[in-house]
Image (spheres, rainbow, N blue to C red):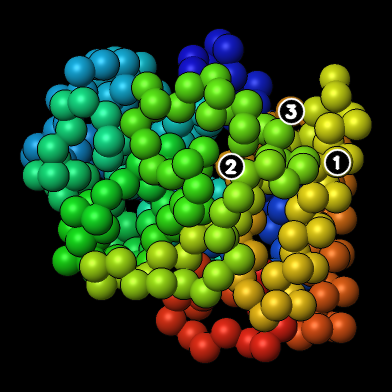
Amino acid sequence: MSTKSYGDAVLGGREAIPEMLKLFSRYGVRATWATVGLLFARTRKEMLGYIPDVLPQYSNTSLSNYKAIRDEIGENEKEDPYHFGRSLLDLVAETPGQEIATHTFAHYYCLEDGQTLDAFRADIQSAQAIAKSAGHHLRSIVFPRNQYSTSHVGICVEEGITAFRGQPDAFAYRSMANRKVTPIVRGLRLLDSIIPVVSRKDLVKPEYCVGARDVRASRFLRPYRSSWPAYSRLHLNRVRSEMRVAAKQGQQYHLWWHPHNFGRNTRESLVQLESILAEYARLNTSLGMESVTMLQAAHERPSAGGEFC
């Protein structure tokens, strides 16, 4: 997506992030923020200084962010708020209960043609290095487009990362290259977000995968749709219903989204989020459901009332 076509959502996401943090603090919610390594940089010079020695050679060259770093990105956050975000990252880190995780250094696509394991390792090493310069040690990862294999997870473990967000065990949600995400797959995911049409086993406790814990995703929180309010209501009901099932069964419910998803229809999306957090608060009181980060979900003993992360 270009700045011209999606820039307003990015800027809207910048406005939404502080409001999300206020809601998390109000409801005692811990969250994991998977951050592209590039966003740790305060300046373009610093960003360039951490570029990996080995770069992915995607067959689809538009997937690589490195040309944009050289040719399009400004000098700092004030000049270019679309591509820098260190002030927001610092705000997240200063908010109690929030975990800083990685989304790779430059939005690395693990299953696209042209990528190699050597290039992926170099990317993760750069992500760890720039995070360390900001005082962080990355221990959790969310793979871009949910693309990964056991080999990629193994490299993460070797580089100090011990928790990752996996995918539900169902055809429509499995990790796959983008060319395999067909209209049928997208349609199934969309329909499953309001009614149960995909059989899956996602309300589970984390499982080991080559040395890391798979903190499996449960549901993508879709932003409010002003053009389709009935859908948004049904989606919200689906999320809250799944949360109640997880709490009663003492299982985990892992809800996720991108901050820029709140960049349009921001007020309505925040109202939707608060409704979900209020449901969590009720489940916390009535059934003992606990809010945890990905790292906590991976390595701490779960409560009898399940986990919300």
Give the residue at mark 1: 234
Left or right: where 29 falls relative to 56: right
Q: Residue at x 82, y 75 (%)?
A: 283
Q: Nearer the viewer, residue 119 or 112?
A: 112
* Amino acid at pointer 1: Leu
Residue 8 image position (x, y, % from top left): 65, 21
Callout in the foreground (3, 1): 1
Q: Is residue 174 left or right of residue 188?
A: left
Quarter holding residue 274? bottom right
- Kind of residue at disc 3: Arg
- 304 left or right of 228 in image: left
- Name the residue: 25% across, 72% down: 211
- Image marks 3 and 2: residues in contact by CB distance under 8 Å: no
Q: Amino acid at mark 2?
A: His
Of the residues under marks 3 and 1, which one precedes in the sequence?
Answer: 1
| x and y, in percent, of residue 131 in the image | 32, 57
Label 2 to label 1: alpha-carbon separation: 20 Å
- How many numbered marks are there? 3
- Compare marks 3 and 2 and give the one earlier in the sequence: 2
Which sits in the foreground, 301 or 140? 301
Residue 176 in view of the camera: yes
Does any portion of residue 66 appear in the rendered image?
no
Residue 96 x/y as whole percent = 62, 73
Q: Secondary structure at mark 3?
A: loop
Q: For residue 258, which numbered disc appears in the image?
A: 2
Residue labelled with disc 3: 264
